[in-house]
Amino acid sequence: MAFHTAFYWGKAHQILFPGWPGTSTGMYVVAVLLVFSLAILVECLAYCHIIKPGPNQVAACFFRTGMRAIRAGMAYMVILAVMSYNGGIFIAAVVGHTIGYLIFGSGLYLKSDGRLLSNFGIGHSKI
């Protein structure tokens, strides 16, 4: 497989791992859905408030640091997938980040007092 240096629209390419997704249309769809889901998850973790302030601040600090490391790793995976220069993968990443922000970061699903309409433990981050 050739490496591209400009955007192209095809399913025969390599994303993240050697030989994956290959030339199979089904595996290409899986790759697009994986990048889309990963982008949504990155946005979810960016606005996620799992740990509430409590008596054990050191443990909370380490947990938040670990969550940030996981989010950074997943964000870099999305970046590496986009660097395959495949148009479908690029669109999946942008739409995934957009939908993730709409759900978790925009405040669209928040009540007027700042609580979520559903109880997923995910809150709005003030920028």
Image (cartoon, helix red, strand yellow):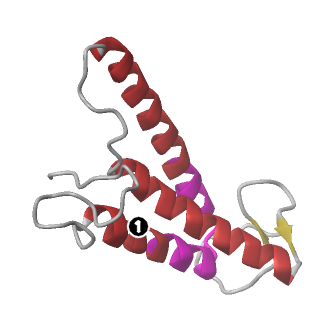
Q: In this rendered view, identify the residue nearer to me: 66 or 24.
A: 66
Tell me if 98 is positioned left or right of 71 in this view. Answer: left
Over which residues does the magenta segment extend?
A: 76-94
Q: Is residue 75 above or below residue 56?
A: below
**Residue 14 spot, x, y in % from top left:** 77, 65
User: What amino acid is at disc 1?
Assistant: Gly
> In the displayed structure, would residue 70 be above or below residue 1?
above
Q: How many marks?
A: 1
User: For this rendering, which residue is in front, 33 or 119?
Assistant: 119
Q: Is residue 102 above or below residue 67?
A: below
Residue 2 horizontal side relative to residue 125, left or right: right
Could you say where residue 103 lies in the image, as x and y percent from the top left? 35, 69
Q: Residue at x 48, y 63 (%)?
A: 40
Residue sitting at x 82%, y 68% = 21
Residue under label 1, please give it: 100
Q: Residue furthest bottom?
A: 9
Q: Main secondary structure of the magenta part?
A: helix
Q: Quadrant of residue 37?
A: bottom right
Which residue is rendered at x = 32% and y = 12% of the image?
58
Question: SS for tag 1?
Answer: helix
Residue 30 among those drawn in magenta: no
Q: Is residue 4 visible?
A: no
